[in-house]
Image (spheres, rainbow, N blue to C red):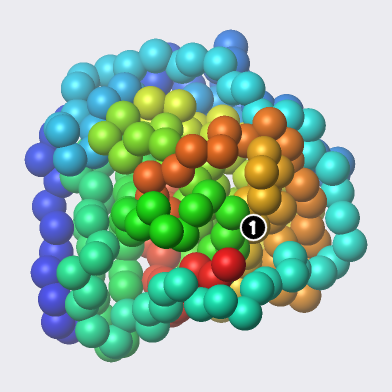
Amino acid sequence: MRGLIWGAVAVMLVACGSDPLAGGGAAGEGGSGAGGASGDAAVGGSGGGSAGATTGGTGGSATGGSATGGSATGGAAGSDLLFSDDFDTERTEWQFDDGDPEATYVYQDGELVVTGGSAQAFVWLPVPEEWGSDYQVDVSFRIESGMVGGAVVRAQDTDLVNAYNCNLREDLDQLRAARHNTRNYFTIGAQDTPVDLKTTYSISGRVTGDKLHCSQAGGPSFDVTNIPGDTKAVGLFVYRGTVVFESFSVRR
C-alpha cells in the first residue's frame, strides 16, 4: 500500500433522519427514470468540503428534470482528451473532501480505494476555464462493499457540495443520476441494470448544455434535463461503501 489515508475531521448526521434502505423518503426527492425506483431520501447534512462540516442539515428540494431511457449504448465521446488518470501515481490535481468523518482515500496497487459513509466521500478535480462546461467524464471502478460509486460530472460548489453525478447502486441494481444539494443526495433518474460486488464497470456522464447523459458500457443509458451549466469541478463519489477506482478521464 502506498499513498496517504485522508482522515475526515468533522461529524455529520443523516439529514432528516431518513435512510433509503429503510424506505423513509424525504420531502424533496428527485423523480426517477423509466424502470427506476421512486428516488432516494435526502442523505447527509449541510456543510462539508474543505471549509469543514456542520452538524446536521436539512433536506432541500430536488429540481432535476425527468429522465428518459435510452438504448444500451454509451454517449459518443469526443477525441479531445482533457485529463486522464489510471491512479498508478498520486496526482496533485486531486482534492480530497473531508466532510465525511468515515471517509478514507488510499492509493493501493495502482488503484484509488475510497470509502464513504452516510455523509459521502468526494474526490474533486477542478475544471479549468478552457475546458468549458460541455464534456464527457468516463470512470471504471468496482464496488468492493456497500452501495454506491460513481463520477461527479458537474459540481457548482465543492465546499457546500452542490453537484450532479452518474452512479451505480449495487443494492438496487441500477444506473442512476443524482443531484447533491448542500451534500444531500436526491435521485433524478434511473435505469435497471445488474450491479455485482467486486466486478469492474465503466460508466460515463456527458453534459451538453442543460442535458446530462448517463450511460453504462454494455448497459443502459438515459438523459436528464435542466442541469445547471456552470461547473467548478468533476470527480469521484462514494456513498456507504468501499469503491476501487481503476481509471478516470475527461474528454471533450
Q: Position of residue 205 (x, y in %)?
A: 62, 58
Residue 194 located left or right of residue 130:
right
**Is 222 located above or below residue 139 in the figure?**
above
Classify the position of the C terminus by image quarter.
bottom right
Provide residue 97's location: percent of width, then percent of height. 24, 48
Q: Position of residue 251 (x, y in %)?
A: 54, 70
The percent coordinates of residue 231 (x first, y second) are 45, 43
Q: Which residue is mark 1?
A: 206
Badge 1: residue crowd in 10 Å (few <14, some 14–19, many ≥20)? many
Identify residue type, mark 1.
Arg
The correct choice, above or below, for 232 with respect to 202 in the image is above
Residue occupying image coordinates x 32% and y 69%: 113
Residue 183 in sight: yes
- The residue drawn where x is 55% and y is 26% is 41
Rendered position, 225 above or below 26:
below
Q: Residue at x 42, y 36 (%)?
A: 156
Q: Toward which corner of the image does residue 83 lie, by quadrant?
A: bottom left
Tell which of 39 and 150 is nearer to you: 150
In this picture, residue 237 sits left or right of residue 3? right
The quarter of the displayed image where residue 145 is located: bottom left
Q: Residue at x 49, y 53 (%)?
A: 132
Viewer-nearest residue: 246 or 227: 227
**Tag 1, which secondary structure?**
strand
Quarter of the image for the N terminus: give it: bottom left
Q: Residue furthest front?
A: 130
